[in-house]
């Protein structure tokens, strides 16, 4: 008989943690790529805020998309929660490093793009390697 192992995506806490970590990793990678583009190609730092916002939006969308794609339910709520948890991690890092709280606009940006990613993930094709939950 085969062993029946539960999928990571059946546990909502673990799946949310995985999605938040993926979103933060994607945010970091996008921020590094956009910073390199800004520094080496554009040579003008006036667009730094817009590029930082784009990196945050891309990370929140990606993390919530993966959460919705593999969880297959509650995309709007799960995506918003993923964005809010990403904000909490970023705010905690900001308080630890600079001693200041980050702006509320980041929370709004992360939750809106997280909700959009969660809805898009739930409505996307079902992954092949997803076991029945």
Image (cartoon, rainbow, N blue to C red):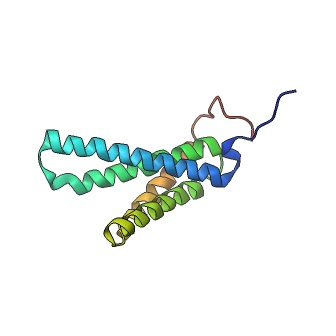
On screen, residue 108 above or below 121: below
Q: What percent of the width, then of the height, locates residue 87?
A: 44, 62
Q: Nearer the viewer, residue 66 or 35?
A: 35
In this view, the residue farthest toward the left is 43
In which quadrant will I find the C terminus? top right
Considering every residue shown, the one lying at the far bottom of the view is 100
List x then y, in percent, for residue 5.
76, 37
- Please identify the residue farthest to the top as the structure is shown: 1
Counting the numbered discs, the total is 0
For image coordinates 43% across by 66% down, the residue present is 92
Q: Residue at x 50, y 49 (%)?
A: 21
Query: Residue 9's spot in the image, x, y percent?
Result: 66, 45
**70 or 27: nearer the eye?**
27
Q: Nearer the viewer, residue 4 or 80?
A: 4
Q: Position of residue 78 (x, y in %)?
A: 58, 55
- Residue at the image point whose x is 69% and y is 50% from the top: 11
């Amino acid at each position: 008989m085969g062993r029946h192992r539960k999928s990571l995506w059946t546990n909502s806490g673990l799946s949310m943690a995985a999605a938040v970590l993926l979103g933060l990793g994607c945010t970091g990678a996008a921020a590094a790529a956009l910073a390199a583009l800004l520094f080496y190609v554009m040579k003008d730092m006036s667009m730094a805020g817009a590029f930082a916002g784009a990196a945050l939006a891309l990370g929140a969308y990606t993390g919530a998309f993966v959460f919705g794609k593999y969880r297959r339910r509650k995309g709007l709520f799960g995506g918003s929660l993923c964005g809010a948890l990403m904000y909490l991690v970023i705010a905690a890092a900001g308080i630890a490093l600079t001693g200041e709280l980050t702006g509320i606009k980041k929370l709004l940006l992360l939750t809106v793009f997280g909700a959009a990613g969660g809805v898009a993930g739930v409505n996307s094709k079902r992954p092949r390697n997803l076991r029945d939950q």
